Amino acid sequence: MSFPSVLWLTFFFVIPTLLVVAISFHSASPDGGIGKEWTLETWRHISNPNYPAIIWRTLWISAATTAGCVILALPCAFAIARMQKKRRTIMAGLIMLPFWTSFVVRVFAWRLLLHPEGFLKHVLLALGLAEPNTQLLYNSGAILLVSVYSFLPFAIMPIYAAAEKFDFSLLEAARDLGARSFLAFRKIFIPGIRRGVISATLMVFIPSVGSYVIPDLVGGKNSELVGNKIYQRTFPDRNLPHASALSALMAIGVLVPLGLVAWLLKRQDRNEALRLAEANGVKQRGGAA
Amino acid sequence: MKRNSFPLVMLVLVLAFLYLPIVVLTSNSFNLSRFGGTWEGFTLKWYSQLFNDSQVWAAFINSLLIATGATLASCLLGTTAALALHRWNSRLQNLHYGLIYTPLVIPEILMGISLLLTFTAIGMNCGLHTILLAHTTFCVSYVTMTVLARLQDFDDSLIEAARDLGANAWISFLRVQLPLLLPGIISGGLLAFTLSIDDFVITFFVAGPGSSTLPLKVYSMIKHSPKLPVINCLSTVMLLFTFALVLTSRAFQNLKQPKAHNGLKNGGPA
């Protein structure tokens, strides 16, 4: 019964992924195709000074987006988790609803808001927070803002799922013992929902690294990301080996943190299980004696 | 004890942040002003321009065809995958689960370029059919996950009861399990439909010249056409369409499943 889906995904997911890696070890032929012989030439090209700057920018924007999303998501998830069951469902639905809508449409909406004659510019001018020639669009700041906007639901949902299982009486206990509410939030709540925070980090970081539409529509010439370069090498330049090498690099950037976190969580589980087993063993032995 | 109101205030601000662009976009589609910085009066003229654009209609038809095809194919593949994952617990199924799960987390652009390279490598010209294959591939994972969630609440003793009463494996699946899973399959299918209709990045890579879908059309209008307000209208229509689909999907997901012991309790003489 697993046959159809395994077969389909092998054909359209596994083989294509391997193909990307394979093509990155070929050179481009002049007609926009792929050269016959195997070579390291493409990978040598990737280390030219142009690329590290773009890779570095992609990483810091992704890291900043992740930090921004998690910081905003924590109080939101906390607030939702403390509501009654019916309200919680409605709130979770409201948070997720924008996520299902077209990505291009949402980014376009921001382009409209940040437009030199758009809504936000008018508001900022009226508040005296912007100069008439302040440029809100086409820079790294715009990419960061729209990325936080786009990926925020990915951060709220896992943290909320963890917060829902959190025992809130622990917080009350901490406050009874004299902790201020922020201290209790930091020392009791955040460690208690650690797993939610970890998966939120991944859920935001991964699509940020792979982002193409956002830098393309609200970023400028000096804020290109790896996603833009992959597109540029694929279509206008028609250099498929280069595009493949960049994609393979991106895949590494995504899979390494993913594998690392999976490994850490597994180890933690094992340690916890060992500790539990030990504690039980001690108790049993103590009881027998 | 007095609760700190800070988290609640943040939640309200974040919700405002999430919906502000959508509200501004929607209201601007009725605004006479071209850039929407100020309100210059109500109009429907942008909408009439939109509905008279034959290219938009062509893209809409393409989107509908692809979404329908990808939904049907991914429902079939996704449901069988979920049944297999639910029934067996083996190393093969662990691998299978990884295969289903990875496309959900991998950035879209990677799937887009890898499929483009594959189609190029086997000499397939890009067009509507390649979009359909690509969409089916990413929809399978979503359908599988939705149906799998429904299967977790499924009471397997219902199947045993059917078998005890003389139904063979096929009949008990067809007459007992499938009808009970149907809301999950429909819900997954509607999500697949939504994702397919709204997908941009993967479509962009595998579309080839001449075959446009709605998101591709919006994108090329943003990039090349000066008709800003018409894009607002098209975006608003797409937003409404998605909202309707998601709400319907939710309604199906929340349909209750009967349990064998409940049935017995209600039907039993005690």
Image (cartoon, coloured by chain):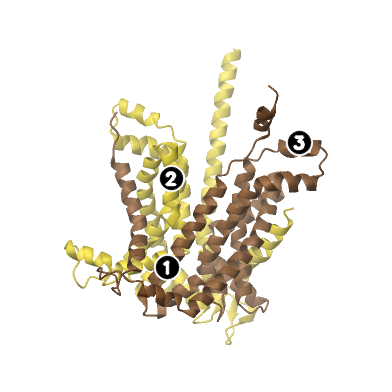
Structural distance between the alpha carbons of marks 1 and 3 = 51 Å
- Which chain does the numbered disc 1 sit on? B
Left or right side of A129 for A285: right
In the picture shown, does residue A21 fall above or below A78? Answer: below
Left or right, B238 with reference to B187: left
Are discs 1 and 3 both within one chain?
Answer: yes
Looking at the rendered structure, the secondary structure element under dot 1 is: helix
Please provide percent x and percent y for residue A136: 28, 68
In the rendered structure, the residue with mark 3 lies on which chain? Answer: B
Q: Which mark is residue B161?
A: 3
- Where disc 2 sits, the SS reads helix
Residue A195: x and y in percent read: 47, 43
Q: Where does label 2 land, which residue?
A: A90
Q: Amino acid at mark 3?
A: Ala
Q: Is residue B75 left or right of residue A88?
A: right
Image marks 2 and 3: residues in contact by CB distance under 8 Å: no
Residue A39, image x, y percentages: 60, 76
CB under 8 Å between callouts 2 and 1?
no
Q: Is residue B16 left or right of residue B261?
A: left
Residue on which disc 1 sits: B235
Chain identifier of the yellow chain = A
